[in-house]
Amino acid sequence: MKLYIISSGKYGSRIVNSLAEMGLASSMVGLEELPEDLPEFIDDFEGYIPKSIPKADLILAVGLFGDINMIVPIIAEKSGAKSVIIPIHDPTQVPPGLQREIEESAPEVKMVFPKPFCTLEPVGDQYIDEFCQEFGKPEMEIESDGLVKKVTVKRTAPCGSTNYIAEHIEGIPADEVELEAGNKLHNYPCNASMATDPVVGDTILHLAGYQVKETVRRALGFAMKSAVVDHETCEASECQHECIKHCPQVQIGLDTVTLNENEQAVIDPASCGCCEICINECPYGSIEMEERKFTIE
């Protein structure tokens, strides 16, 4: 795979360096670094397009804010790439309207906008999926006998935080891993924004933390905390399923809240972020947070 990267700012530099250190340097056929202080609105992109663009299979644009993202499909066309990843770490980076404009400018190119980068999963595209074999939504294997004995990273977050977390949860009680893994993400630290994203109703930093929780829960086979719906009080015939509409995980494409045969909400303890937004939005008070061991198959 030939990877061409367009980067800007500290976030972009961190991702580029992390990917290179984790073995992707040999796949990088080019790197264009743009200044951070570009105007939000740009009328003429010509001066920002690199004069020499190598042939590439996949374009990765990290850390770009505002209209400058419109050069990404232009660079994809010039490089011959049909696959593009534009990760979002800040709610002001690529607003929904700009995202649509980028996609519509190159309908023949497969584009994904993972929010944040560590939510990226295979999408059926050759080169995006090849990238996802090693980088994207974290996956681990955990060996435990009450204490965590061994952690194997199967897929790491592109920033490298998964490897850091794996190193620091060995030797601790398995029941404490869920909480400790989240703490280690903050210690790393995660560079995603703490500003509330109006599209998802939560911060992108929190979304990154939810992916870490899900990763260790699935690896251990259990969760220690989750929101739970009381189907005795859930008014399926009246409720507009506010829990689904407001769940941040659902807003980024996960099946964290689904409906059963009675059209009542069911919350997946593996991917529940424990944000309590659904609890606050439920008009019937039918959702509570429970701290107990939930088995995950």
Image (cartoon, helix red, strand yellow):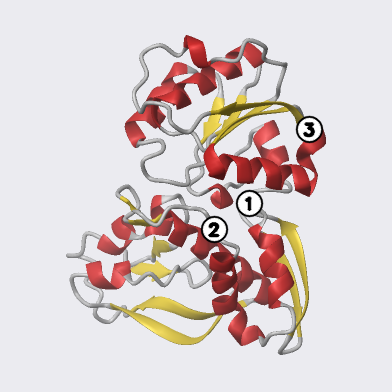
| Most foreground residue, 236 or 38 | 38
The image position of residue 51, as x and y in percent, is 62, 10
- Residue drawn at (42%, 69%), measured in percent from left and top? 267
Residue at mark 1 to residue at mark 2: CA–CA distance = 8 Å
User: Disc 1 residue type?
Assistant: Cys
- Give the quarter of the figure containing the N terminus: top right
Horizontal side of residue 218 vs 95, given as left or right: right
> Considering only order in the chain, which callout, 2 or 1, is on the residue closer to the N terminus?
1
For the residues bearing labels 1 and 2, Cβ distance under 8 angstroms = yes
Q: Secondary structure at mark 2?
A: loop
- Residue 287 visible in this rendered orientation of the protein: yes
Q: Residue at x 44, y 77 (%)?
A: 226
How packed mark 3 is, by other alpha carbons closer than 10 Å (few <14, some 14-19, many 20 or more), is few
Residue identifier under label 3: 27
Q: Quadrant of residue 219?
A: bottom right
Determine which residue is flagged by label 2: 190
Q: Residues within 10 Å of mark 1 (few under 14, many from 20)?
A: many
Local SS, label 1: loop
| Residue pictured at 31% horizontal, 68% vertical | 278
Instruction: Return the residue at label 1.
Output: 159
Instruction: Give the image location of residue 43, x and y in percent.
Output: 36, 14
Compared across the picture, whether 34 is left or right of 272 comes to: right
> Residue 35 location in percent, x, y?
51, 29
Q: Earlier in the sequence, mark 3 or mark 1?
A: 3
Residue at point 49% right, 73% down? 269
User: On screen, 296 above or below 48?
Assistant: below
**In this view of the protein, can residue 122 be seen by the observer?**
no
Give yes or no for contact between labels 2 and 3 (Cβ–Cβ under 8 Å).
Answer: no
Task: Give the residue type at disc 3.
Answer: Ser
Q: Quadrant of residue 201?
A: bottom left
Q: Considering the numbered disc 3 on the image, is that residue within a helix, a strand or a loop?
A: helix
- Mark 3 and mark 1: span between their CA atoms? 17 Å
